[in-house]
Image: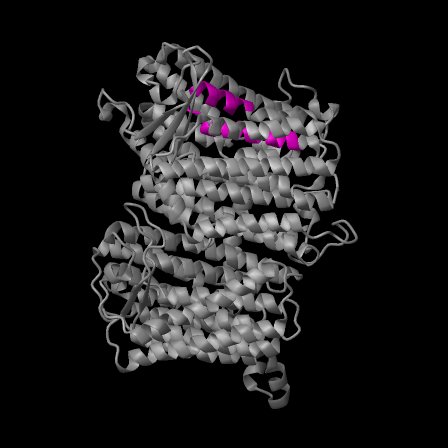
Amino acid sequence: MRQLSPLLFLGLCLLPLLCAELLPFVRGAHRVRITARLGALATLLASALLVSHFYAQHAERVVAELPLGTSSHALHFAIDALNAPLLPLAAVLILASVLAAPVARLASRDMRAILWLEALLLLTLSSADLSVLALGWIAQVLPLHVLLAGGGARAARDPNAFVTRLYHAAAVLCVLSACLALGYWARPGGFLDLNLQRIDARAVPSQARTLLFALFTFAGLVRSGVFPLHSWLPLAFERGPLLPLALLLSTRTGLYLLARLVIPVFPEASHAAMPALTLIALASALYGAVAALAQTDLRRLLAFWVISQSGIMLTGLVFGDADAISGTLLYWFGFAVSTTGLALLISALEARTGTADIRRFGGLVTRVPMLAACFFLLGLANIAVPGSVAFVAEDMLVHGAMEKHPLLTLVMIVAMVLNAVSFMRAFTAVFLGEPRPERVPQGTLQDLLPREHLTAAALLLMLVLAGVFPNVLIAAQRPAAKSIAFVETLGYAQQGAAEPRPPVTATPVSAR
Amino acid sequence: MHEPSTAYLAVLLAPLLPTLTFVILGLKLLLRRRANGARVARLVNWAFVGSVLATLLVAGSFAFHLDEPLLIDLDAWFHTDDYRFEAMLLVDRLSAPMMLLTATICGLIGRFSSTYLVAEPGESRFYLLLSMFATGMFMLVMAGSLDLLIAGWELVGLSSALLIGFFADKTFPVRNALRAFAIYRTCDIGLLAGTVLIHHYAHTSSFEVALGLARWPEGAPPLSEAAANMIALCLFWAACGKSALFPVGNWLPRAMEGPTPSSAIFYGALSVHAGAYLMLRIYPILERAHYARAVILLIGLATAVTGTLMQRVQTDIKSQLAYATSTQVGVIFVEIAAGLPRLALLHLIGHALLRTLQLLRAPNVIHDVTAHALPHAQAAHSTARARSWVYHLAFSRFHLDAFWDRALVQPLLRLAQRLDRGERAFTTWLARTPGAPPSEQSPQLHPEHRKPTP
């Protein structure tokens, strides 16, 4: 069996970082773009290499350990069924963004922020240490806030940016305090030595355990934009840098925190909190879907779809049925690709017209037919038309959820229907109907450029291929779904005192 | 169930040809290749010719020597340990004539449109959507499981909505397309729920097992009466949307905004009968679902009566035909509920063919009226009974649109606006809490926003 080196993990995280720090030394906007694209492409290849190594091992989990000098501490990386598809997915989405973003968004500063985001995302996804995972998770929002602050002195003082910072600061504080407390109780080695696999939350007093669970969950829900902790999201989408935001939300690091950390480490509390989490998830699904009907701004509309779909995915995750969780993980994939694609197209439309206000559009299909077609097809893939991965995901999700809670699942289905209607409503308002020359900018509108067009087509192809041949993804993610369903359903009490975690076939690979 | 090789190949070929044209045309249009309308029409029409020949072979096999249903298992589309999405095709005495009907009418419409839509902007798009519809319709009528039927059902619904809004630069077709799409989607909740219920009670959605299918319409589904009633009612709700039954059927005349050939194929012939086909397909379940049958009977009657009344007060030929269709579809549902599935199938086929002819002739009706002074056409404008309450009721389309607007659409939109206002008020309040910087009117956070940089 071929051995994995921790350098592969390290290289994966460092590649975009090095590229980002190289950008200030590159002269000329064109060269900056080329460098950023090459960096994103190299990262994608590195992630594909890593994931192919993992699947070649035929193990449920492969870990790698990088010793830190002569101390007893080490960095741990792991790849398993949960993060294996997410690593290349994040790299693909970043590459799509640097390829297809409007030229104005391809300046050195924006590219650096996006590449930093990529490095932190990959670090969070591949880390097996609580400390590194938490730090990566916390730091993910920093590029976003750097861009927010970079909008000029006026923007830096903006009260609306304050709302986004407030929510993110609250989430960061929760994660930090919960990690420190967990380090204090759960590991004698302290915060620096918190391999996720070895954390035993039973060492934490039961009341504090509930509190830690609540803190982590709160942070995860804030980052996911789940109702009622979502209010930063529409505001940030409407006024902030759309692409980094869409990338942050598409990769679902909030739900990842729940799936990777909260549910496995606190199975008992997760089980007890399932009814409350189910209600929150369904409320989010429905709230986002209904509020989307009133939106007149494409950016804000996208934000409410994200809120609704976050609720749908959380519903699948907390229902605890393996089929529903499999559907959720598949939905995660489709959601990430289509949301990033839609964000790219909204950016493209905005770059051409100077607005994302739906009321100012109408009949654009005759002027930008390819943009309209790509927007429509990506939207269809988002609302689960047969042939798209979302159709398969929704089928599995609804089937699994309906077996557990038929009536509650109806609420989820209603939210899906409303999302579809609000998408059609927005599409018809922007692209169809009588053209309104007095409202949209006069003169010729540039249709999609070849790079934008090919990127959108590639994203569509991903969604269709995953929809027509979904078994590859389902099989790849199935162990993760089973693992989440197992710990969530049983909890500690039923698992017996000896082994708090579901058994996994670990293949440790030491760097020593 | 045996699988004779010729019929087997014909069964696969019939849907494959329009599916291939759909994929080829879709890729071509997506990759920005300019498509020659006449060539596209030829390609699609030849595909339909192939489909017609294949379905003729299938129907002939069933008429002369095939007695048992032909089941083709294409393996699961996707599966987990506990769940399989059954992708199997079923051809029997119900689906074989429906396949022939689908191929024939699609072929006729394709041929008619190659003249009718010549040089029309969007001709290629029309043929793309026609191929997509044919793919969906074949999938729907040949599905051997409810799972696969859903996929076909959704494709039919989507192509229907897109063809209603075919004239994308006009306000009303687009608005009506959106309304039809919303109604379809709302009613599809029933299809999803019914499918999950079938999985729950029969542990599969395969018609062979879930319906205990022998020779259609006979069958012995492994379901209790309560389960049968629940499943039938859920699926009937889906059928209400697709077949424009009372009280959700007023989208049908609005759907006539599309090009005449698409009106004929969707709302005269095939799509509007998809709901009736679904009921015929699950007929063995209906036989056990007495309450559901009573509901179907009542709704079918209400659709027929309101349809015929509304038809009599319409002043344009396509609306008249839409309501006449609604009337006949209502009668077909009554026949199904009354335990006459074979009669309903015959009625469905005959009605589809007649209505296709009438709708394709509709653009010539003005010529017919002036040349031959058709008494029926003049009678349509009669206001002799204008004072009767029936007339008013029919003229106002039984206030159904207003009812749904007031009962569902407007409250939902009001709620959405309230939520949005609440959201904005909350974030404004949050931004003004102590410690926050002073508020400014409409500040912009990022230079990318609202700055045209093509």
Q: Is residue B433 left or right of residue B76?
A: right
| Up-down relation of residue A153 to residue A82 (above or below) | above
Q: Main secondary structure of the magenta part?
A: helix
- Residue sitting at 56 percent across and 31 percent down? A118
* Residue in front for this viewpoint, B393 or A496: A496
Left/right of residue A84 with respect to residue A439 in the rendered view? left
> Which quarter of the rendered picture does the C terminus of chain A lie within?
top left
Determine which quarter of the picture holds residue B386. bottom right
Residue drawn 26% across and 80% down?
A: B65
Residue found at the very far bottom of the displayed protein: B372
B353 in the magenta segment: no
Task: Give the camera-side residue of A469 and A18.
Answer: A18
Asked if residue B418 shows in the view, the reply is no
Based on the picture, tell me whether residue A119 belongs to the magenta stretch.
Answer: yes
Residue A478 image offset from top left, x and y in percent:
34, 40
Of the pair A341 and A356, the residue shown nearer to us: A341
Locate residue A32 relative to residue B302 in the image: left or right: right
* Whether residue B375 is situated above or below residue A446 in the rendered picture: below
> Which of the 4 image quarters holds residue A27?
top right
Does residue A9 appear in this view? Answer: yes
Q: Position of residue B38 (x, y in %)?
A: 61, 75
What's the coloring here? one colour
Which region is colored magenta? A111-139
Q: Position of residue B248 (x, y in %)?
A: 46, 59
Quarter of the image that includes the N terminus of chain A:
top left
Residue, x 38% and y 39% (percent of image)?
A56
